[in-house]
Amino acid sequence: MGLFTADIKTLDDLFVHTLQDIYYAETQITKALPKMIAKATDPQLKQGFETHLRETEGQIKRLEQVFQMHGHSPKAVDCPAIDGIIKEANETAGDIGDKKVLDAALLASAQAVEHYEITRYGTLIAWAKQLGRADCASVLQQNLEEEKATDAKLTAMADSKVNQKAA
């Protein structure tokens, strides 16, 4: 089902499609994070990625809960946006020899992922409320809060040391 196809006729259809999109994105992130953990040299950054991997696994479980609450089986649809963000991160990381600059690049890539997730969860929450699904919105809100917290931690880490070391 493409984003602008005849398969999406209602806001509910769009909600389910976007839920499938973020489900795909989160599963791709669980595949990308171990590679980022392996490449990171800053101990705090490495630990932050490890924590976020565990959080992402929990977010996937919550998404599966929302699917079930909404009467659907968990299903992923390709998300070209997250694929592009991850591809760009891999390409950039592959081009950097200086480990301190690599950490800054990995951190920036992680923030790009967080910002994408924040937009998706914000939209899903708004649509869930519009559809009268405060229960789904509440579960999705937990994921959004974790994404915002991770973004704030990454920003603090970048500002306090990672970018300074890279400079």
Image (cartoon, grey):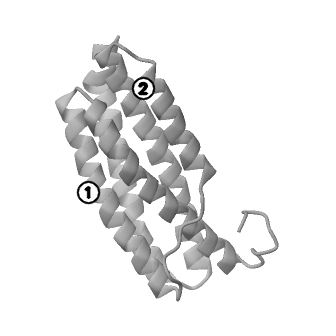
Image height check: is 25 above or below 16?
Answer: above
Residue 142 visible here: no
- Camera-nearest residue between 27 and 166: 27
**Which residue corresponds to mark 2?**
93
Q: Within the image, what quadrant is residue 64 found in?
A: bottom left
Q: Could you tell me which residue is drawn at 42 percent across and 26 percent down?
A: 93
Q: x and y percent of residue 72 in the render?
A: 53, 84
**Which residue corresponds to mark 1?**
54
Please indicate whether residue 26 sits to the left or right of residue 12 in the image. Answer: left
Q: Could you tell me which residue is drawn at 48 percent across and 53 percent down?
A: 118
Image height check: is 45 above or below 124?
Answer: above
Q: Residues within 10 Å of mark 1 (few under 14, many from 20)?
A: few
Q: Within the image, what quadrant is residue 126 found in?
A: bottom right
Q: Quadrant of the C terminus?
A: top left
Select label 1 or label 2 by which is in front: 2
Q: How many marks?
A: 2
Q: Within the image, what quadrant is residue 128 found in?
A: bottom right
Q: Quadrant of the N terminus?
A: bottom right
Q: x and y percent of residue 73 in the render?
A: 50, 82
Q: Amino acid at mark 2?
A: Ala
Residue 155 visible here: yes
Q: Amino acid at mark 1?
A: Arg
Q: Earlier in the sequence, mark 1 or mark 2?
A: 1
Please indicate whether residue 6 sits to the left or right of residue 102 in the image. Answer: right
At numbered mark 1, what does the secondary structure look like: helix, strand or loop? helix
Q: x and y percent of residue 81 in the render?
A: 60, 48
Q: x and y percent of residue 97 in the render?
A: 36, 14
Q: Could you tell me which residue is drawn at 52 percent across and 85 percent down?
A: 70
Please indicate whether residue 136 sits to the left or right of residue 153 in the image. Answer: right
